[in-house]
Image (tube, helix red, strand yellow):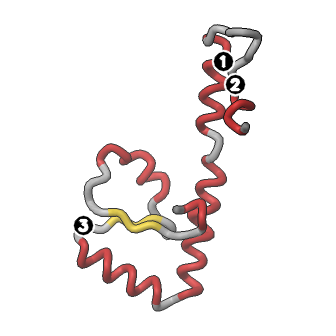
Amino acid sequence: VLACACPVITGPHMHNFATALHDLQGEAVAQTPSMAQALQLVHQWLADPAALRRRGALGQQLVQAHGGAVARSVDALDAWLPKSGGREHGAQQLDA
């Protein structure tokens, strides 16, 4: 969603994503403790289209800055993976 320049509102249960949430929180991602507060935040964001666009752009920038994690992980593991049938592993296959 952030990659599409849309800010995100989450609920309170983000324990499995605590690190990612911490890195993304700010104007692009907001965590709320209740549905009522989430809806209130939606109304606030929709009332200010310029701020909404700014929040979305910030989220998009965050995604672009942190992108490529899968490709970097595959590249790091490539030396440890067996080669099979002349076909090499690596991030280039992820883009195909």
What's the distance in space between the residues labelled 2 and 1, CA to CA?
A: 6 Å
Q: Where is residue 7 in the image (x, y as percent from the top left)?
A: 50, 69
Local crowd size for mark 3, using a 10 Å CA cut-off: few (<14), some (14–19), many (≥20) = few
Q: Is residue 15 left or right of residue 59?
A: left
Work out whether mark 2 precedes mark 1 in sequence or the reverse, and give the earlier one.
Answer: 1
| Crowd around label 1: few <14 · some 14–19 · many ≥20 (10 Å) | some
Q: Which residue lies furthest to the front in this view?
A: 85
10 or 93, nearer to the observer:
93
Mark-to-mark CA distance, 3 and 2: 41 Å
- Between circles 1 and 3, the one closer to the viewer is 1
Query: Residue at the spot x=24%, y=67% of the render?
Result: 33
Residue drawn at 61 percent across, 47 percent down: 66
The residue that mark 1 highlights is 78
| Dot placed on the residue nearer the N-terminal end, 3 or 2 | 3
What SS does tag 2 mark?
Answer: loop
* Secondary element type, mark 1: helix
Residue matched to label 3: 33
Q: Residue at x 35, y 63 (%)?
A: 10
Residue position marked by numbered label 2 in the rendering: 90
Answer with left or right where residue 24 lies relative to residue 31.
Answer: right
The answer to which image quadrant residue 61 occupies is: bottom right
Residue 13: percent from left, percent from top = 26, 54
Residues tagged 2 and 1 counted as in contact (Cβ below 8 A): yes
Q: Do the residues labelled 3 and 2 touch (CB within 8 Å)?
A: no
